[in-house]
Image: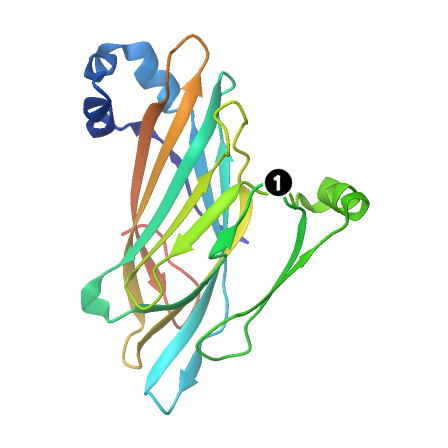
């Protein structure tokens, strides 16, 4: 997989205001450690497919989201939003996962054969098999909820069942977009919102990161625009 970006998060001062703790933005130490919480997004290039019956192309985006907390912080919530420019005509046809409950060891298989959806198979593993498998492939996931089919925006939420459980995110995400046949690029606004808990502070602190990214639909992705 190719790194799409490695983003240092910032304090979400709008979120601080909503919590009634806007005075925290005055503390330079908090500003500094906030930037040491990072989220990495990677992507593997996939082939596009033309569907003559609707005169549109489809292209799967094979992504991986990884969070890197500051040593004294714990993530308890992450939201990844990918919003495609409406003028591009790009529409989300399918996404995986749409929902994964926390604490359940699973074997997940996602297949795309060139159409308008993914084939998604989820098999519950036995306790012993789950323990053994999770050591190598990390199949114990946080709770995940994805949405956005038939829109130009996809959202994935990662959250823990309890605030005293650290949120570990190193997860494959699959996104299938359809777009007009004359389109060779599409631009997306990528927003990452997170909540972290830090030692010595009461409650969570909201963080945010944003990136504008252009994707080549007919060849390898490009960098930031």
Which residue occupies 77% across, 44% down? 127
Q: Which residue extends farthest top?
A: 200
For numbered disc 1, what is the local secondary structure? Answer: loop
Q: Is residue 164 left or right of residue 85?
A: right
The quadrant holding residue 168 is top right
Residue at 81% across / 44% down in the picture? 128
Q: Is residue 33 above or below residue 114?
A: above
Q: On screen, 186 above or below 12?
A: below
- At 66% from the left and 43% from the top, the residue drawn is 138
Question: Residue 28: horizontal and vertical position, in percent?
Answer: 28, 11
Q: Quadrant of the N terminus?
A: bottom right
Q: Is residue 52 above or below residue 181?
A: below
The percent coordinates of residue 45 (x first, y second) are 49, 63
Nearer the observer, 88 or 72? 72
The residue lying at 77 percent from left, 49 percent from top is 126
Per the image, the residue denoted by label 1 is 103
């Amino acid at each position: 997989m190719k790194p799409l970006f490695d983003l240092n998060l910032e304090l979400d001062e709008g979120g601080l205001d909503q919590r009634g703790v806007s005075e925290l933005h005055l503390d330079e130490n908090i500003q500094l450690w906030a930037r040491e919480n990072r989220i990495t997004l990677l992507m593997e290039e996939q082939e596009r497919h033309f569907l003559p019956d609707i005169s549109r192309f489809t292209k799967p985006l094979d992504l991986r989201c990884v969070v890197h907390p500051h040593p004294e912080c714990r993530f308890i919530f992450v939201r990844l939003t990918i919003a495609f420019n409406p003028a591009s005509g790009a529409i989300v046809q399918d996404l995986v996962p749409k929902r994964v409950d926390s604490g359940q060891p699973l074997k997940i298989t996602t297949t795309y054969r060139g159409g308008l959806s993914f084939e998604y198979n989820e098999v519950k593993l036995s306790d012993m098999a789950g323990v053994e498998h999770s050591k190598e492939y990390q199949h114990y996931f946080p709770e995940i909820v994805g949405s956005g089919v038939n829109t130009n925006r996809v959202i994935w939420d990662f959250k823990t069942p309890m605030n005293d459980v650290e949120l570990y995110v190193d997860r494959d995400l699959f996104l299938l977009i359809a777009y007009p046949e004359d389109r060779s690029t599409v631009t997306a606004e990528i927003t990452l919102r997170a909540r972290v808990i830090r030692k010595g502070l009461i409650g969570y602190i909201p963080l945010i990161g944003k990136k504008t990214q252009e994707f080549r639909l007919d060849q390898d992705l490009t960098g930031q625009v």
